[in-house]
Image (cartoon, rainbow, N blue to C red):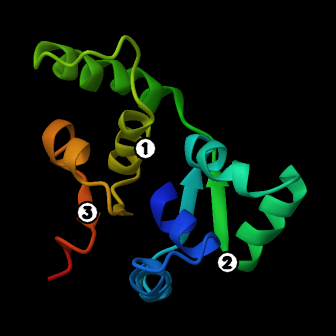
Amino acid sequence: MVDSCILLDIFNDDDCWYQWSSKTLFEMSKEYDLVINTIIFTEISFNFDTCEQLEKTLAQLDIQTLEIPLAVAFNVNRIFKKYRKNKGSKKTPMPDFYIGAHTSYLDAPLITRDIARFQTYQPDVKLVSPEMDYRT
């Protein structure tokens, strides 16, 4: 699973993160099918004028978009309850909860730079980030 921050680094040619994100995406593509879900699709869509442009770009990167299964949506509630129990202030589940739950469901690694929520609320998710890499 490719988190939106990684794709935004690449789409926006981020001075700090472009190199790491593009290299990591390339390396991971050798071992895994690259996927995003509809939440990530939504988060990166503001960089494009049309849905078709985004779909074409994702196809060029060989990234598939997956629908979120009902079992994943159901499990997001469990994660959100844990968040609220820990004094979280949001009234609805955050996108990271859906992304983490979907990644866990797929038993896949998540390429991301935004690790705090995943480590706290979904520690079973295997993370690939500048700070940590489950492969090492």
Q: Are marks 1 and 3 in contact (CB under 8 Å)?
A: no
Q: Name above or below for residue 12 compared with residue 108.
A: below
- Which is nearer the eye, 21 or 35? 21
Residue 127's disc is: 3
Could you tell me residue 89's position as x and y percent? 26, 15
Does residue 1 show up? no
Could you tell me residue 58's position as x and y percent? 71, 68
SS state under label 1: helix
Residue at position x 34%, y 26% from top?
Answer: 75
Residue, disc 2: 61
Amino acid on which disc 1 is placed: Ile
SS state under label 3: strand
Residue, disc 1: 99
Residue at position x 35%, y 44% from top?
Answer: 100
- Which is nearer the eye, 34 or 117? 117
| Total numbered labels | 3
Instruction: Measure how far apart labels 2 and 1 are at the Cα level.
Output: 20 Å
Q: State which tag comes first along the sequence, 2 or 3.
A: 2
Q: Name above or below for residue 41 compared with residue 9.
A: above
Residue at position x 36%, y 39% from top?
Answer: 101
Could you tell me residue 79's position as x and y percent? 26, 26
